[in-house]
Amino acid sequence: MDGSEMSGRPMGDPPSSHRLSNPTAAERFLALGAVGHNSADVIVVLNHGGFVVYGNPVAQQFFELSAEEGVGTDALGLIHPDDRERILQRFSELMGRPGGSIRESLRVVTPSGDEKDLELVATNSFDNPAIEGILVNGQDVTQRNRDQAELASLAERFRVAFAENMAPMTFTDLEDRIIDVNDSMCEMVGYAREELVGHDSTTFTYVEDVGITEESHRRALAGAAPQTRYVKRYRRKDGRIITVEVSRATAVGPGGMPQYFVFSERDVTEERKMNAELSKRALHDPLTGLANRSLFEDRLDQAHARARRHGGYGAVLLIDLDDFKGVNDTYGHVIGDELLSAIADRLRRVARSTDTLCRFGGDEFLVLVEEMAVADEARVIAERILEEMSAPFSLRGTTFVQHASVGVAVFDPSSEEVATLVQSADIALYEAKRQGRGRVVVFTPSMHQEAVSRFTLAQDLSRALERGEMSMAFQPIIDLANGEVVGYESLMRWHHPERGAVPPDVFIPLAEQSNLIYDLGAFALRSAAEAMTRLPRTDGYPPYVTVNLSARQFHDRNLAQLVRGALRHHDVAPHRLLLEITESVALEDIAESLTIIQELLALGVGIALDDFGTGFSSLSYLVQLRPRAIKIDQSFVRPASPSPQSDAILELILLLGRKLGVMMIAEGIETPAQYNRLRGVNCRYGQGFLWSPAVGLDEVEDLIARLGESPPIDHSRRRRGRMSERHVVEGE
Ligand code: C2E
Ligand code: MG
Ligand code: MG
């Protein structure tokens, strides 16, 4: 049989007559046995037909065949089907080359189904009389191949995990010198791999943060933690500073000794910037940049905790701008916003670095003051703030003054509650505003009680109208010359079901704080108009009636319409109605007041300046307001301590009225002496308890009768004549 015979043989054919049947074969077997028996390699001899004539013990074990089973086996049948063709080809070639050899790797399938790898050298030894066949010397490389495959897959896994990782990674040795970096790391720091390997991270670490790396290195070496994480800054090669989150892991060898370090890093610069921006936005007012409420409350809690630990006082200052709405309405929201920013800047100037400034709401600001040695410091700071505010603001070519009021609530180490501090400051602020503009009031517990009762009263007031608890009372206005009733001031009355009469000085300011004032104002006007149809005529002439207007009513856009409606509804002549406004209300915004007054005068009604002399009237403005009547304040009628000076002022006011042709009405005349004094200085009209307090409409008839029967002043000697209607309504 030759090689071509062998190659032509169908694969896997069973062996024919090739058995160890002749002595030469037996001799060979013995001879080979000496060589192959003790070899650690797989030794097999094949004959021309490719059948096994010899297999050493290693081969028997490898192929899982005993000597008896093995000899005569078709070698091809042992080879993995996929490898057979190739091996057959190579062996066929070898058959034709006596003395030649080939080197091959192949897979074997054992009877038990195991796959094994064999690396072999086959030598054509037919010319070797000791062998006379193909000598196959092979090595079982199954395990080696498996190990290699595993290593290769490990290497691939590592390659993907390190080289191709998007996360910057670094390996360092025990001295923290860089062994390797991946591309992402190079990209992040802007250095080439060659510039980094062999150096430590100081190359690209921001100089102030070098210590962070050193500390983590120390801890890692000491085995303090298998993994540490820290944040530090890098200075890239181009100089840009970035913030990086680093995690360092320690690779340990046998015995747990550190071998090298693996770093995985993350550039968190943008993320941090965004977070900072987000938290700034979440905690700050976008317009002024001051803290918002939630940040303020947080700081307040902390401040309180500190005060409890270390002592000292703290305070909450609530600052409210007086009539900020006016700025918005007059100059527009752009200027309004600019003003708020400017105010924030001024607050910053006054504040210390430890204070927290907050925009609390529209035109309200909060200041948290900490670490005061004495409680009274808070008032000093509040006053300093008001002083800072007092300088005029110049915005876009407009200069104006913006006043503010401050409510202060102080806390000390013993204060239990901080949650109510802002509320307390608010109560103090209310008190400050009540006292006038530009004031500081420090909260006291009694204010809280007042606030509570004010609140319940406001609740009651909101239902008072519908419950019919409100009414109008009328106080006669007297011609002091003859005792005639020429008109009435209408004054509102509230009969509270439990408290009885609540004075208008209490409930009008309360109503001013809500829209309730408009309902009450409308009620007053309608009631007055209706009363005009029922009030008795004096001497055949209809009396006039005055109605008080509060500041907000006066500025109400619907005022003129309301007045016209009320008069028309009851069909009364407009000239019989006088609207009382105080000079401070009228002079607050003189331009707007003049427009409103113009509108009212066009209806035919008159204006009376109430409480005259209590403000700081500018005489020129006074003329522009064109009042029909001036009501001289009670403080001039009943001065606390009468003096030639107060007489002089009274005379001056009266002289002024006369020159302007205005009715002068003295308020609050209680005694004949006061009456005489007024008459002595030629005051023509007056009202007061000397004649009567305000009475209900139903009682007016009786009152007139009583005054006729027993007048408090005997006018018989003074009476000079009757007054004309013109006299009463349009002044002297
Ligand atoms: P006012 O307009 O200056 O009213 C005069 C106040 O003096 C009234 O107090 C009146 O009862 C009181 N009075 C009159 N004669 C005498 C007197 O001889 N001696 C003393 N001691 N007082 C006298 P009242 O009714 O308590 O009203 C207080 C204030 O409440 C009023 O001051 C006015 O500003 C306001 N008010 C009253 N009614 C209304 C109203 O309908 N609307 C508005 N907006 N305010 C009103
Ligand atoms: Mg009045
Ligand atoms: Mg008055």
Image (cartoon, rainbow, N blue to C red):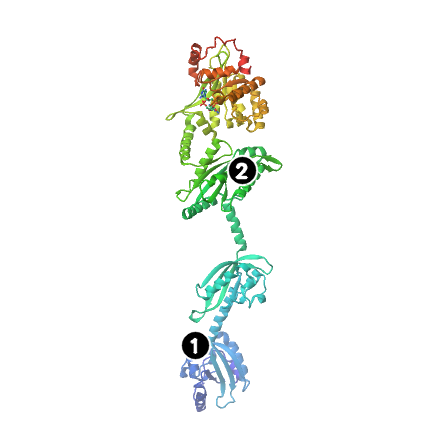
Residue 476 in view (yes/no): no
Label 1 beta carbon less than 8 Å to ligand 1: no
Front residue of 220 and 394: 394
Between circles 1 and 2, the one closer to the viewer is 2
Q: Position of residue 431 (x, y in %)?
A: 46, 33
Q: Distance of mark 1 from mark 2, alpha carbons?
A: 103 Å
Q: Is residue 55 above or below residue 538?
A: below
Residue 320 has which mark?
A: none
Q: Position of residue 424 (x, y in %)?
A: 43, 38
In this figure, what is the number of numbered marks? 2
For disc 1, the neighbor class at 10 Å (few under 14, some 14 to 19, many from 20) is some
Residue toward you, 68 or 175:
175
Is tag 1's residue or tag 2's residue first in the polypeptide sequence?
A: 1
Task: Pick the quarter of the image with the C terminus.
Answer: top right
Estimate the x, y position of residue 131 in percent, counting from the top left.
48, 88
* Secondary structure at numbered mark 1: loop
From the image, tell me which residue sits under label 2: 387
Q: Give the residue displayed 48% in from the left and 83% down from the top.
A: 137
Does the image show residue 232? yes
Is the residue 75 above or below the residue 589 in the image?
A: below
Q: Which mark is residue 110?
A: 1
Q: Residues within 10 Å of mark 2 (few under 14, many from 20)?
A: some
The local secondary structure at tag 2 comes to helix
As drawn, which residue projects farthest toward the left? 498
Task: Confirm if mark 2 falls within 8 A of ligand 1.
Answer: no
Q: Which three-letter amino acid code belongs to the residue tagged 1?
A: Thr
From the top left corner, tell me how far across and down residue 672 is, in percent.
Answer: 45, 15
Q: Nearer the viewer, residue 705 or 29?
A: 705
Give the vertical position of 156 relative to 400 (above or below).
below
